[in-house]
């Protein structure tokens, strides 16, 4: 599907801050009280090349805004060590 639409996820490893990319969107989730994604805040790209360091700065500000929205709506961010939905915790099968 990504090939058909010319879209891809960009990994910033190996890119310099001065490199430029064209991006369609940056998104960050807002979580509800059960730590599920309730909605996403996003920044839409302009279609013009933007420096990687600027994209990363926008992403950090967006994550901060999503964190504020999560807290103000009495939501909570999922724990990093929590099992993913639909998976069994480690040792669930006697292992």
Image (cartoon, grey):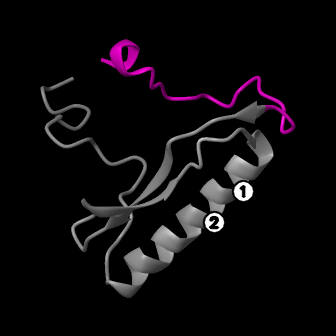
In the image, 82: left or right of 59? left
Question: Going 27% across and 42% down the picture, which residue do you hit?
Answer: 83
| Residue under numbered circle 2 | 61
**Tag 2 secondary structure:** helix
Mark 2, other Cα within 10 Å: few <14 / some 14–19 / many ≥20? few
Q: Where is residue 41 in the image (x, y as percent from the top left)?
A: 42, 63
Queried whether the magenta region covers residue 44, the answer comes back as no
Instruction: Give the quadrant of the C terminus.
Output: top left
Q: Can you say which quadrant of the picture contains the N terminus?
A: top left
Q: Is residue 29 above or below residue 32?
A: above
Depth check: give the residue in front, 21 or 91.
Answer: 21
Span colored in magenta: 1-19
Image x and y of residue 58, in percent = 66, 58
According to the picture, the residue beneath numbered tag 1 turns out to be: 57
Residue 2 falls within the magenta-colored stretch: yes
Q: Residue furthest front?
A: 47
User: Residue 77 — which label?
Assistant: none
Give yes or no for contact between labels 2 and 1 (Cβ–Cβ under 8 Å): yes
Name the foreground residue: 30 vs 53.
Answer: 53
């Amino acid at each position: 599907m990504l090939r058909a639409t010319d879209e891809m996820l960009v990994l910033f490893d190996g890119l310099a801050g001065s490199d430029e990319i064209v991006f369609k969107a940056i998104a960050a989730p807002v979580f509800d009280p059960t730590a599920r994604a309730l909605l996403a805040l996003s920044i839409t790209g302009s279609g013009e090349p933007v420096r990687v360091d600027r994209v990363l700065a926008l992403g950090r500000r967006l994550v901060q805004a999503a964190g504020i929205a999560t807290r103000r709506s009495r939501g909570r961010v999922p724990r990093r060590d929590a099992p993913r939905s639909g998976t069994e915790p480690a040792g669930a099968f006697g292992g």
